Image (cartoon, rainbow, N blue to C red):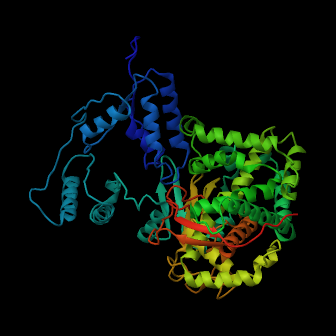
Amino acid sequence: MSEHHRDPFWLHYYDLTLILKGALEKRLSDNVKYLEKQAKTILKQLEKFADDHILPVNVYSGLEIDIAEHLTTLHETFSQSVMSATSDMNLLGDYYATDFTVGTFEVGGRTFPIEDEYLTENTDNYVQVSVIKAIEIHNSKQIGDILVFLSGQDEIDNAISDISGKIDLTTAIILPLHGKLTEDDTVKSKFVLDCRQRYGSVFQIKLPSKCMTFITDPRDWTTVYGNSNFCLAVDDVWIKIFGMSGNSFKHKEIYDEEHRLYTRYLQSNGLNELTQQFGKYLRQSMSNDKAAFENGQWKYSGLLELSHLMIYEASTRALFGDIKPLEFQKQFNIFDEKMHYFFAFLPNFIYTLFCSEALKARQSLSKAFLLNQHCNNESEFMKHYLDLIHDHPEWFSKTDAGSKSLGLLWAALGNTFPATFWSLYYILRDQKALDDIQQEIQLSLPDNELWTSEMLAKCSKLDSAITEAIRMASNAMILKYCRKQTHIQLHDQRQLTIEKGDAISLYPMVAHYDHRLYPEPFKFKYDRFLANKQMLANLELEQEKIGSIGFLPFGYGKTMCPGRFFARNQMKICAAMILKYIDYEFINLNDEPKQSRYRVGIGIASPDHDIQIRYKYKSFSAIHD
């Protein structure tokens, strides 16, 4: 204790966790007692945040532990209350005593009256018996709450369905309360697929004071995209994630000029220069890696690590010219590792408290780009983009050039790393795919020339395999917010009402794994997009043509990723270089990674762990100017 007496402040860790994890109801405890100004500020900000924000499902895994650790050192009089009916208090006490050297004590009993009703005899059909008992209490007792303890999501759903059919729903509200989800259920993609199976193609999730509506049938997506009442939070991405000032987003002239640059330099003829520069720098990176060990010597690495090695330096130099990307690679990795927290759009104080290292890395990266503007050999795209910023000091802050450069670099790399990993992982494990693609590469991509977009376009089997890997690994969630109450008509003539401020979510992965669109959707088929080159344009759902909207890894319409063509060319070149010039062996053929639940919802999902390989180079040479 401090020399000076202070009343301790109390904060329910359970309530804090509920708020941060986007629980179904706001529960800020009544027994919060504090004198500390910092605690009071945190509580107010958390309460406002719970009211004003929609939180992505399961993005906070691990963050609540960081919060607990930080709060135990916030002040020496801080007391943390953990509410639990089943925790072993001795184990909990040992944990805190060992890791935090703090004391614990247990407070038993309840602070409110309750009646317990137990089954009088064992029964296998305890769910049905529990339902009967709940209905009996509901019909015979005074107004109050009935809490039925069951042991799993299926039991809870079955009980709710049973009770709903036997009582007057105007006299009761039935709520499912899940104390813990299984590991699979915490994966957002599985959660959405399960909800669609249980509740249909349209369902809603209630969050603190808002509602998120999922529309999972692609036949309804065009209606949503075409409605101007639904808007994307694009500005928040640049402001919250990359630290831009935000002044420029108010001016349509800037938006139009940016998109002219995207069209001119990231598509058609303008794309060729960037593609060839990337290929040249990638060869140089491979040459440097090859020189680091003797010919014929095996090098051990992770497959994702190898993808980083091949792409990071080459892509950075292709965009920014004679910059030294290896000098800030560590900072980029730190920032990228916390990207799922930044995409959650948490309050700034959360990042300050728990993501300080990532914030420092972001600041360091932005500063590095500010100090290295207009380097020799920079791309035409970056040259004109930076000129646009410098020509309008009234709209851009002094640091926006660095923040924008960082954002463009992450856009070029953040999803390209995992997409390349999955492409290589699936191709290297499929001997037929490997043989066919290697043969195609040998015929279409010469050894002593820089590969152009036209050359890469001839590699249709490689393109099909990469498209298939993207289909399986793409997990982007498209969130749109409703400006005013809006009524939309679904493809089956149902009417749907979205309230002002609520969110509507389109999750393309649901279509990517729809067996009606893609037979055997969980199986990698490298030639899936090869048999019919017009497959995407001709996609049908229940004999209704839906076209390419059934495949949306890069977004849709005006919000489609402007760098998607460069990203695909990077993947093709990297995969082709590795398949053409490197021998490899998997260390463990039985090692099968899953998609990381931390990056689900923001693009291409990373693997939950790297796959160990060993590799060595065949004969090849770098190409210099």
**Could you tell me residue 306's position as x and y percent?**
62, 62
Position in image of residue 617 (x %, y %): 66, 69
**x then y, percent, for residue 304:** 58, 62
Where residue 401 sits in the image (x, y, percent)?
A: 80, 44
* Number of numbered discs visible in the structure rendering: 0
Residue drawn at the location 67% of the way across and 42% of the way down: 362
Q: Is residue 397 left or right of residue 96?
A: right
Q: Is residue 562 at least partly visible in the picture?
A: no
Q: Is residue 295 left or right of residue 302?
A: right
Residue at image x 22%, y 63%? Answer: 127
> Residue 104, located in which quarter of the rendered image?
top left
Picture residue at 78% right of the left edge, 44% below the top: 369
375 versus 225 height, above or below: above
What residue is shown at x 46% (from left), y 65% (from top)? Answer: 190
Give the quarter of the figure containing the C terminus: bottom right
Residue 540 sits above or below residue 121 on the image = below
**Which quadrant is the N terminus positioned in?**
top left
Report the front residue among 560 and 198: 560
Q: Residue furthest right?
A: 391
Residue, far left: 121
Quarter of the rendering containing residue 538: bottom right
| Residue reaching furthest to the bottom | 531
Q: Is residue 87 visible to us here?
A: yes
Q: Nearer the viewer, residue 240 or 216?
A: 240
